[in-house]
Amino acid sequence: MPPPLALPGLRQTQRLLREPLRFHVNAARACGDAWGANLMFAREPVVMTCHPEHVRSLFTAKEEEAPSVTGESPLRPILGPSSVLTLVGEQHMRQRRLLLPSFHGAAVARYIRLISEVAEREIDRWVPGEAFALAPRMQAVTLEVIMGGIFGVGWAPEPGSGDWHLRETLRRAMGVSTHPLWQLVEWHNRGGPARPRGVLRALLWLIDRQLYAAIARRRAGGGGGDRTDVLSLLLEARDEQGRPLTDGELRDELLTLVLAGHETTANSLAWTVERLLHTPAAYATLRDVVRSEDDAAAAAYVEATIQEGMRARPVIPMVGRRVKRPWRLGDYVVPANTPTLISIAALHHRADVYPDPEVFRPERFLDQRPGTYTWIPYGGGVRRCLGAELAMAEQRVVLRAIAERTDLAAARWLPERGHQRNVTMIPRHGTRVVVQTRR
C-alpha cells in the first residue's frame, strides 16, 4: 500500500476543507506519487495518486473494473437516481449519449452570442473605483447562460410568468447554496438517509416544483419543436430503443446541468482573474494582446491563460474510481474495492510536468496542447465533463470581454486561499477586485 499521511484523520479532514490546494500539494511532497488518506467524511480509508501513468490506467480502465465514486456521492440524493453525474455503467453511458449533442459543435456555437450579451451586460454594471467580489458576479453570468441555454428563458421574463418563477427560484436557490453557512446543511445530510432532510429537502421541493412545471409547459406546447435550448433537445431525444426521457429523468438531468454549470465555471473565471492580478506581467500581456488587432494572437493567449488558470487552481481538485481488482500504482498495489482518488491539484503542481508549478505562466500552453493525462480539470475517460466545451467557450468570451473593457486591480494585497465547498475549491474571499477603468 502507498504510505499513509502522518496525521490523524480529523487533522487531514480539517486541512483538506480549509486549504485543499496546500493539502494536496504537501501530501505529494511528503509521500511521492501515491499516499493513503483517512478523511472523516469518507466511509473508509482512501488512496490518492498524482502520477500521470496512474491517471492513464484509471481513466482508460473498463467501467466495470474501476467505476466512478460519484455513484456513492452525497450529491446522489439531491440530483436524483437518473443524473448522468452519479450514474455508473451502461445507465451512465445511455444518459451521456442523450445529452452529448446539446454540448458540442453547433449547439455550443449557438450559445456564444448569448454568453457575449450576458457578459457585456454584467460588465456595464461595474462602477470604477468600487471594490466587489468577482466570483458572485461570475455566478450571475453563468446562471443567465444556464437559463438561456438550458431552459430558453430570456434576459427579462415577464414578472409572474412561469419562466420568471423558474428563474427567480433557481437564482435564490443558487444564492443560498453558495452561502458559507450552507456547509452546515451539507454536513447535516452527509451519511444520513437516502433522501435529503431539513433545509435541503425544503429547498429541493421548491426547485422541483418549478422544474416539473417547466417540463409540463414545454410538453403542453408540443415538445421541443424548432427550439434549440437543452430542455427542448432532451424532449426530442430518443435512446437506442426509441424511448424518450421520463419527466423524472428530465428533472434529474436539468438539475444536474444547473448545479454543475453554475459554480464551477464561475469560480474558474474568478480564480484565473485572481492569478492574473497577482501576476502583473501576465495580466499586462493579456490586455495588450486582446486590445491589439491580432485576433489570432489574442485568441491563443486567452486560451492559454484559461488553461493555466485551470492548471494552477482546479475548481474540482480530485476525482475518483473504486478499483474492483488489485490495482498497480507504480511500486504499490491497491487492494480490490479501494476508493482510489486522482489528486488533480497535486498532478497540476508536479515540477517534472510543469517546471516552476507555483508560477502563473500562460506561455507554457502557447506552444503545446494540454496533456490528456497531465491537465485534467474536467476529469477524463468516459467520465470527462459533458459540458467542458461549453465551459471553455464561456470562459473565452467572458475573460476576453473583461480584459478588453476593464482594468482591474486586486482589492486584497494577499493572494486568495481556497477552501473546499462540497466537491469544489473556491476562493475564500470571492476574488475581491477594484475596477480602475472601464472602456
Image (cartoon, rainbow, N blue to C red):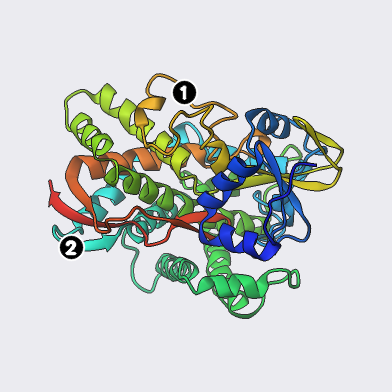
Asked if residue 130 lies left or right of residue 87, the reply is left
Q: Give x and y (percent) for residue 184.
A: 57, 75
In the rendered structure, the answer to whether residue 391 lies left or right of residue 1 reads: left
Q: Please tell me in which quadrant of the rendered image residue 365 appears.
A: top left
Callouts 2 and 1 close, C-beta under 8 Å? no
Instruction: Please tell me which residue lies in front, 166 or 261.
Output: 261
Name the residue tied to disc 1: 369
Q: Does residue 270 show up?
A: yes
Q: Secondary structure at mark 1?
A: loop
Q: Which residue is mark 2?
A: 130
Q: Position of residue 435 (x, y in %)?
A: 18, 54
Q: Residue at x 72, y 60 (%)?
A: 42
Q: Quadrant of residue 95?
A: top right
**Of 216 and 360, the residue lying toward us:** 360
User: Which quadrant is the N terminus positioned in?
Assistant: top right
Give percent across and percent down for residue 122.
26, 55
Of callouts 2 and 1, the N-terminal one:
2
Q: Is residue 422 visible?
A: no
Q: Residue furthest bottom?
A: 198
| Three-letter code for the amino acid on which mark 2 is drawn | Glu
Q: Residue at x 57, y 27 (%)?
A: 372
* Residue 263, placed above or below residue 294: below
Residue 247 is left or right of residue 374, and the answer is right
Q: CA distance from mark 2 to mark 1?
A: 38 Å
